[in-house]
Image: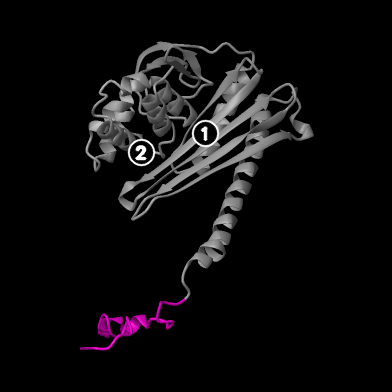
């Protein structure tokens, strides 16, 4: 059973904002100098973070990212990539090594973070839906390229539910502007019933002179594909129809988020702001250079 300290640190790791795990670990190490072995005991937390956040890594000799998730896990730290048909080992604990990098070396962090995969071997997933998976991979890749600046995607077969899992993650890091963000999509497609379900997660952290974080989750109940996408439909046409549904779901969710932001800005946030300064008079900003601090702005008398 994990200690109280290990449980607390695990919670910090699992809740780390997008692109900021190294910063969280650096702070944890400062707070736990009396327990130098503590981080070695929370490997499950690093694994959970990597799998739930759809962490991306690069395989040796490749410039293309591959995804880490519970769906393409082979156990004992090994994962597979459907497109390249290779399996690899990931040492989740090496995330800790990134905490030694200076805070301003985010590019170096990213490069280091993409070098953790090792022990690569050929691997061909065993699935009766291999042709459909191939078509879905192409359609999902096209969708991701068209709608997200930087993204990584894959398709996996989930034998426990006999469904195909479509995974997509898009990361946008802007530490120089004090914000980072991540979009994650997970879809379950059942070839036998032509139904689609899943979740969309958005996580944005803004931390200039403050600490504001937005985390949203959209649960997608089973969506029935059109009649023309029955199980007997050609693989390419079926994949195209699946991605048409995905595009519609994600577009509507983005529109909902935009409307929500506008409502917050004009509603709740606006209500939190003071309408007038304490003097009950509007500041004439074009004349602010001529104000005498403490008299004109504060309303006091000059001495």
Determine crowd level at label 1: few under 14, some 14-19, many 20+ residues with C-alpha closer than 10 A: many
Quadrant occupied by the C terminus: bottom left
Q: Main secondary structure of the magenta part?
A: loop
Question: In the image, is residue 286 part of the stretch drawn in magenta?
Answer: yes
Q: Quadrant of residue 286?
A: bottom left
Figure quadrant of residue 58: top left
On the image, the x and y values in percent for residue 253 come to: 61, 47
Applied colour scheme: one colour
Start-end of magenta stretch: 276-303
Q: Which residue is mark 1?
A: 168
239 relative position to 141: left or right: right
Q: Residue 190: x and y, percent?
A: 69, 24
Give the residue at mark 2. 20
Labels 1 and 2 touching (C-beta < 8 A)? no
Q: Foreground residue, 94 or 135? A: 94
> Can you give x and y, in whole percent of width and height, for residue 34 in the image?
24, 26
């Amino acid at each position: 059973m994990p200690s109280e300290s290990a449980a607390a640190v695990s919670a910090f790791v699992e809740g780390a904002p997008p692109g900021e795990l190294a910063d969280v670990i650096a702070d944890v190490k400062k707070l736990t100098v009396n327990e130098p072995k503590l981080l070695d005991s929370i490997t499950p937390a690093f694994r959970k973070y990597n799998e739930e956040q759809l962490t991306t890594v690069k395989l040796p000799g490749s410039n293309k990212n591959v995804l880490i998730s519970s769906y393409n896990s082979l156990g004992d730290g090994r994962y597979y990539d459907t497109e390249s048909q290779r399996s690899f080992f990931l040492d989740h604990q090496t995330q800790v090594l990134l905490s030694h990098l200076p805070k301003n070396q985010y590019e170096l962090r990213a490069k280091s973070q993409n070098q953790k995969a090792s022990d690569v071997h050929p691997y061909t997933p065993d699935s009766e839906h291999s042709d459909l998976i191939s078509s879905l991979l192409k359609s999902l890749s096209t969708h991701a390229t068209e709608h997200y600046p930087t993204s990584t995607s894959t398709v996996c077969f989930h034998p426990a539910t006999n469904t195909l899992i479509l995974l997509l993650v898009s990361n946008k890091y802007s530490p120089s502007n004090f914000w980072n963000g991540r979009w994650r999509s997970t879809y379950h497609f059942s070839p036998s019933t032509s139904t689609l379900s899943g979740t969309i997660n958005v996580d944005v952290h803004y931390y200039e002179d403050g600490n504001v974080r937005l985390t949203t989750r959209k649960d997608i109940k089973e969506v029935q594909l059109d009649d023309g996408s029955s199980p007997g439909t050609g693989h390419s046409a079926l994949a195209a129809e699946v991605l048409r549904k995905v595009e519609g779901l994600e577009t509507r969710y983005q529109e909902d988020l935009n409307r929500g932001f506008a409502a917050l800005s004009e509603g709740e946030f606006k209500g939190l702001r003071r309408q007038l300064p304490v003097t009950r008079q509007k500041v004439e900003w074009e004349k602010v250079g001529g104000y005498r601090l403490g008299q004109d702005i504060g309303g006091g008398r000059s001495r």
